[in-house]
Image (cartoon, coloured by chain):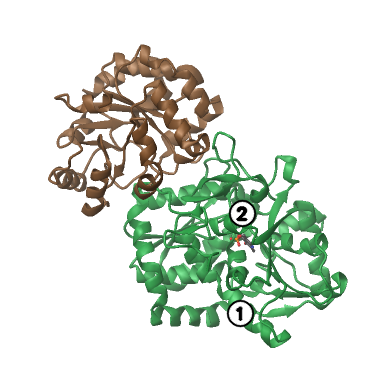
């Protein structure tokens, strides 16, 4: 499996664990135990049971008839928006809260951008009766107010990140600082396939349930397991990693990663990391990231808080570098347009992160008998205010 | 043997000061270094500011942001201190985060440090294994000591590995925390200082994080070779500027 992490957590030249010594014991404890714990029958049973009865898995693989007719190809939607809490993020938080329990931790911290991961973390902490602190950039707190309220209602404490750009990158810094200050009892639930090894690999494994289901669902519907295309949006890259996971080595499956171009790749307000990034180190991982020539991490921009991250996970950096995946970037305006189109053609209002993936139907030409699976990573409830402002609804 | 090794042989407790280059004003870097030497400081850590200083508390975060805002870059720093050895002879260490060094080019960075007369480097997020596999040969080539951190959570086994990989001193982080001044040390720290002292490591230890005044300096150096003050010194610069340096250093010992 050359697209997965090796023993040291490298995907090609990307990955590793560039962490200060203060974090070493925590990360090392996790590294030594995560695969063993995930392989335990009682862990697996509880994980599967919760995904089924609590999250509502398997999520449907839905044939989008009107969308297919419009683009003259066969479009299937993997309905992660129907997961409890409204996005794929909960697959990972269920896995990690069980991991935390097996490691004997009794306090959880997390970072969040759009608030989806924060809500998914607060949810599983309520479920397990564990203390939860979520760091969120001050700017994101303002633009994702409904999710802030949800986290509070679920009993989590939301702490504003006031440093730097006051968005996802800074919330991640604050969570890491919290972990440095609380090294014994706390587990850090990272929300995407980013951070030091073993996080990218662990989170990808928890999300891999998405492509696992796509395989058998497609077999039932089309008589074959492999689609011609799998498309997903990439912020840090967790929904994409889950959707690609079991297809990485299947060369007949084309992989498309969709990044946020913001106001345009060259506008100075963008989050298209593959186009604008260079190799560097962010949050403990060697990966592609947006930075100055001097190595200072720059502020990304996207209308969607969940894609507003200056890096991508090391798996995606490798998929880009090795050309296994095609990277496409989509502007704010296109994302909004295609979010509206999905709403009106299929009756599904997507998260703005997810809307970016749908613009690919227009940007790329697919054949009539191509099977195109789009990972519908989340629903748009949290983004209603942004949609209202944008479309003057 | 470089200046750090010689300094470590002196029969006294060493006082080392960390400050952020380009703070409070962009061109204060050299003045701060010279004033620290004038006031009897034994060693200096020149902080190369980074946009995302993960291991730092609010004080050093703020000084880093300000220094970057003032226009500090790797090139600017090297240019500011290019003639520093004409006036300063105490050991100088560059401390920062790995990404700016990586972008500059690790070899080019080390070569430049050697040319200027820098003696050592502290990159908290360049881990031991990565250093040994990828960069050790380069550091050696330019006679730069790489300084590693240990914390109260670091296992004895790993401390031995770090001791083996070190050739100057070990940076002993006083407690599980980001940088920032605390008011004192408790029993937990005393036990930790005791535990490390009894390990008889080949490299001396210098304690950092949470040292802010004469009392904490004395406590931290009871069983170690010296101590590093960072945030408390930056606070002095913020409040009193360059003129506050002399009084602050003289209040420590
Ligand atoms: C619905 C949705 N999709 C995608 C993302 C982006 O994250 P990732 O790339 O890890 O899937 C987010 C992040 O908040 C999200 O809420």
Q: CA distance from mark 2 to mark 1?
A: 28 Å
Q: Return the disc, 2 or 1, that comes first in the chain's sequence.
A: 1
A262 shown above or below A190: above
For image coordinates 24% across by 45% down, the residue present is: B164
Res A8 quadrant in image: bottom left
Report the chain holding disc 2.
A
On whether ligand 1 comes within 8 Å of the CB at mark 2, the answer is no
Callout 1 crowding tier (Cα within 10 Å): few <14, some 14–19, many ≥20: many
Q: Quadrant of residue A369?
A: bottom right
Q: Which residue is mark 1?
A: A213
Closest to the observer, A334 or B77: B77
Secondary element at tag 1: helix
Tell me if residue B20 can be seen: no
Is the C-beta separation of discs 2 and 1 under 8 Å? no
Camera-side residue: A32 or B219?
A32
Is label 2 in a helix, a strand or a loop?
A: helix
Residue A223 image point, x, y percent? 71, 87
- Chain that appears brown: B
Say which of marks 2 and 1 sits in front.
2
Mark sitting on residue A321 = 2
Is residue A47 placed above or below A287 in the rendered structure?
below
Q: Residue at x 43, y 53 (%)?
A: A17
Relative horizontal placement of residue A251, taking residue B47 as reference (left or right): right
| Ligand 1 found in image quarter | bottom right
User: Which residue ends up furthest to the top in the rendered image?
Assistant: B86
Residue at 72% from the left image edge and 48% from the top image edge: A262
Q: Which mark is residue A128?
A: none
Where is residue A300 drawn, in percent x and y? Answer: 64, 45
- Check the picture and name the quadrant holding the N terminus of chain B: top left
């Amino acid at each position: 499996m050359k697209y997965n992490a090796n023993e040291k957590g490298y995907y090609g030249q990307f990955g590793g664990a560039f962490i200060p010594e203060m974090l070493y014991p925590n990360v090392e404890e996790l590294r030594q135990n995560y695969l063993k714990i995930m392989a335990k029958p009682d862990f697996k049973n509880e994980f599967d049971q919760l995904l089924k009865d609590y999250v509502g898995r398997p999520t449907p693989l839905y044939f989008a008839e009107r969308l297919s007719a419009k683009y003259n190809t066969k479009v299937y939607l993997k309905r992660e928006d129907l997961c409890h809490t409204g996005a794929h993020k909960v697959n990972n938080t269920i896995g990690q809260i069980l991991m935390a329990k097996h490691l004997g931790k009794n306090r959880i911290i997390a970072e969040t951008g759009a608030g989806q991961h924060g809500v998914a973390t607060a949810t599983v902490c309520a479920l397990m009766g564990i203390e939860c602190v979520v760091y969120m950039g001050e700017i994101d707190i303002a633009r994702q107010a409904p999710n802030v309220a949800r986290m509070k209602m679920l009993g989590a404490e939301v702490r504003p990140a006031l440093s730097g750009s006051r968005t996802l990158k800074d919330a991640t810094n604050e969570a890491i600082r919290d972990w440095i200050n609380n090294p014994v009892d706390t587990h850090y639930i990272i929300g995407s396939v980013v951070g030091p090894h073993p996080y990218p690999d662990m989170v990808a494994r928890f999300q891999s349930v998405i492509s696992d289901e796509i395989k058998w669902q497609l077999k039932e519907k089309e008589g074959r397991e492999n689609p011609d295309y799998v498309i997903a949006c990439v912020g840090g890259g967790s929904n994409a990693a889950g959707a690609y996971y079991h297809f990485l080595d299947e060369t007949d499956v084309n992989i498309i990663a969709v990044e946020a171009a913001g106001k345009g790749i060259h506008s100075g307000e963008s989050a298209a990391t593959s186009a604008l990034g260079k190799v560097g180190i962010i949050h403990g991982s060697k990966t592609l990231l947006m930075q100055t020539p001097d190595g200072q991490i720059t502020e990304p921009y996207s209308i969607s808080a969940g894609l507003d991250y200056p890096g991508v996970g090391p798996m995606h950096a490798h998929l880009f570098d090795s050309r296994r995946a095609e990277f496409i970037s989509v502007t704010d305006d296109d994302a909004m347009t295609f979010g509206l189109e999905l709403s009106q053609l299929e009756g599904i209002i997507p998260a703005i992160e997810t809307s970016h993936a749908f613009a690919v139907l227009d940007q790329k030409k697919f054949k009539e008998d191509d099977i195109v699976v789009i990972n519908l990573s989340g629903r748009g409830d949290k983004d209603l205010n942004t949609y209202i402002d944008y479309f003057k609804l | 043997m470089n200046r750090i090794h010689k300094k470590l042989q002196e029969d006294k407790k060493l006082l080392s000061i960390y400050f952020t280059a380009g703070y409070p004003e962009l061109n204060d870097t050299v003045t701060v270094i010279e004033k620290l030497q004038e006031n009897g400081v034994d060693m200096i850590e020149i902080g190369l500011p980074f946009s995302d200083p993960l291991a730092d508390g609010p004080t050093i975060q703020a000084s880093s942001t300000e220094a970057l805002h003032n226009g500090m870059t790797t090139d600017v720093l090297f240019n500011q201190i290019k003639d520093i050895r004409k006036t300063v002879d105490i050991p100088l260490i560059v401390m920062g985060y790995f990404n700016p060094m990586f972008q500059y080019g690790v070899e080019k960075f080390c070569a430049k440090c050697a040319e200027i007369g820098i003696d050592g480097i502290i990159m908290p997020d360049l881990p031991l294994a990565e250093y040994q596999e990828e960069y050790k040969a380069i550091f050696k080539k330019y006679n730069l000591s790489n300084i590693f951190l240990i914390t109260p959570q670091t296992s004895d086994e790993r401390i031995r590995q770090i001791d083996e990989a070190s050739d100057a001193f070990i940076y002993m982080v006083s407690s599980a925390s980001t940088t920032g001044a605390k008011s004192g040390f408790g029993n937990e720290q005393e036990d930790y200082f005791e535990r490390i002292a009894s390990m008889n490591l080949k490299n001396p230890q210098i304690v950092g994080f949470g040292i802010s005044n004469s009392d904490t300096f004395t406590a931290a150096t009871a069983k170690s070779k010296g101590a590093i003050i960072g945030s408390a010194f930056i606070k002095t610069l913020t409040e009193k500027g360059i003129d506050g340096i002399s009084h602050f250093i003289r209040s420590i010992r």
